Amino acid sequence: MAKKFISFLGTTDYAEVFYELNGIKTESKVKFVQQALIQLTCKNFDIRKDKIIIILTDKAKASNWEKLKESLKILNVPNEMIIPLDIPEEKGEAGVWKLFEKIYNEVLEQDDSVIFDITNAFRFLPVVMYSVLRYAQYLKNVKLDGIYYGAYEQTENEIEPIINLTETYEIIEWAAAANIFTNYGIAEELSKRIKKQDKEFVDTGKLSDSILTVSRNINYSRGLRIMEGNIFQNCIDKINLYKDDNNINPALTPILETVTNKIKDFGNNSVLNFLPAVEWYIEHDMPAEALSMMKEGIVSYLLAKNELNYKDSQLRLLLGKRMSYAKEYKYQPYEEKFKESVEKIMEQDVAKELNEVVKSFNNFRNDIDHCGFCEGARSPDNLRKEINKAYEKIKEIL
C-alpha cells in the first residue's frame, strides 16, 4: 500500500503567496500550490514507496515543470518521489477515456491512499478524477485521504486559503450507500457511514445499529422479530432524533426519509407485518424469502385471529401441514390435542380462501426450494409473475 499525492500543474506565472489549510499556514511564501499542499499534507510520506504525481499538459510542462521541480527541492523532496505524468491533449470523449485509462492503469495501484489537488484541473478534469477514484475504490480498494483546492486570487494580505473538498466526495459515498439500501435492502454500507456521523455530533442511541438490525432481521427472515415490530419503531424514533439535530450532514436527511418510508408500514406487535416483509422481498428480488414469509405469515395470521399462540412451533407446523393436504389429513396421536382448533380454523371462509393461495404457490415454492431440479421447472420471469400474483391475492383477502 502506497500514499500518492496527485496534482495538475497549471500554466500561469504565479506570484509567491502564503497558503493556509485548517488554520495552518505555510512556513514561507510559495509560488506553486503543490509546494503548500506537499508541505501541509504529505509530512508522513515514505520516500521508499510513496509518490508525488504531477499531471502535465504540453503547455504546463513547457511553462512551469522545471520551475516546480526547483521549488520542490526547497522542501527536500527526493527526485525519485516525483513522477511526471503527461496527459493527452485530445479533446472530446476519446480524450476523457484516455485520461481515465492513464490514471487508472499508470497511477492508481492496489490499496493506495490518495490525496488529490484539483486547483489547476481544467474544466471537466475534476469530474474525471472523481469518476476514476470511485472506480478504483471498487476494483483496487483505493482510499481517498483528501481533495483540496487552492483558491489563488492574489489577495492583499497574500494569504490564500486551501479549501478541503473531501466532504463533496462524501456525497458520492452517501449516494452509493443509499443505492445499496434502497435497491437491495442491504444496510451494511449505510450503517458504516452513519456510524462515522455518530462520533461527530450527537448521542443517537446508535441509529447505525438500529438500521442494520432492521435490514438483517428482514433479510434473514426473522419472522418473530418482524411480527413483534419493535425494531421498526425503535429505528424510526432514532431517525427522528437525528432529523432534529441541526448538525446533521445534509446528505443524510433524504436518506433517512427513504429508510422511514421503507419501514413505516410495519406495526408494533402485528402478525400482518408479514405483508410489508413480503413486499420488501419482492422489491429486492428475494423469491424464496417471499414465498416462505407468505406461508408463515398466513399461518401466523390465522392462529392469531383465532386467539391461539402463533409462536407455538408445534401448532404452527400442524396448521401448515393441514393447509398443504386435502381434507383427509390424518392426524398423528401427538397432534390430536390440536385437532379441534385446527379444524375450526379450516372451516372459516378466510382460511379457505388463503388456503387456495397456499396451494397455488406450493408447486413453484418447491420449484425454488429444489433449484429447478423438477419436472415443469419455471422460468425466472414466470416465477416472479406467480409470486406477485399470490401476494396481491393475499392482500385482497385480508
Image (spheres, helix red, strand yellow):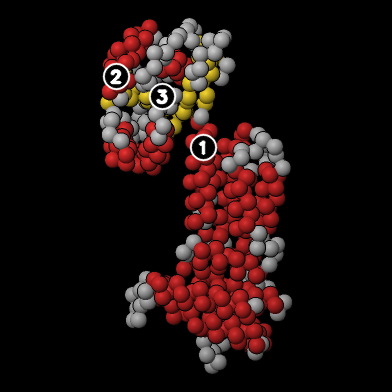
For the residues labelled 2 and 1, the Cα–Cα distance comes to 32 Å
Task: Give the secondary structure at mark 3.
Answer: loop
Measured as percent of width and height from the top left, residue 238 is found at 68, 47
Q: Name the amino acid, label 2.
A: Lys
- Residue located beneath label 1 in the image: 170
208 and 176: which is toward the camera: 176
Residue 367 placement: quadrant: bottom left
User: Residue at label 3?
Assistant: 120
Q: Kindly identify which residue carries mark 2.
A: 61
Q: CA distance from mark 1 to mark 3?
A: 21 Å
For the residues labelled 1 and 3, say whether their Cβ atoms are less than 8 Å apart. no
Query: Between marks 2 and 3, how big is the CA–CA gap?
Result: 13 Å
Residue shown at 52% from the left, 26% from the top: 164
Residue nearest the observer in this picture, 181 or 92: 92
Picture quadrant of residue 214: bottom right
Say what amino acid the circle numbered 3 marks: Asn
**Nearer the N terminus, badge 2 or badge 1?**
2
**Count of marks, rendered view:** 3
Residue at the image position 42 percent from the left and 13 percent from the top: 14
Q: Which residue type carries mark 1?
A: Glu
Count neighbours of disc 3 (C-alpha within 10 A) and say few if under 14, some if 14 to 19, many if 20 or more: some
Side of 181 where 380 appears, left or right: left
Using the image as rendered, state which of residue 177 and residue 323 is in the foreground.
177
Residue 291 is labelled as: none
In this view, 314 is above or below 257: below
> Where is 174 relative to 4, above or below?
below
Q: Rate crowding at label 2 as few (under 14), some (14 to 19) or many (20 or more) other CA atoms within 10 Å.
A: many
Give the quarter of the figure containing the N terminus. top left
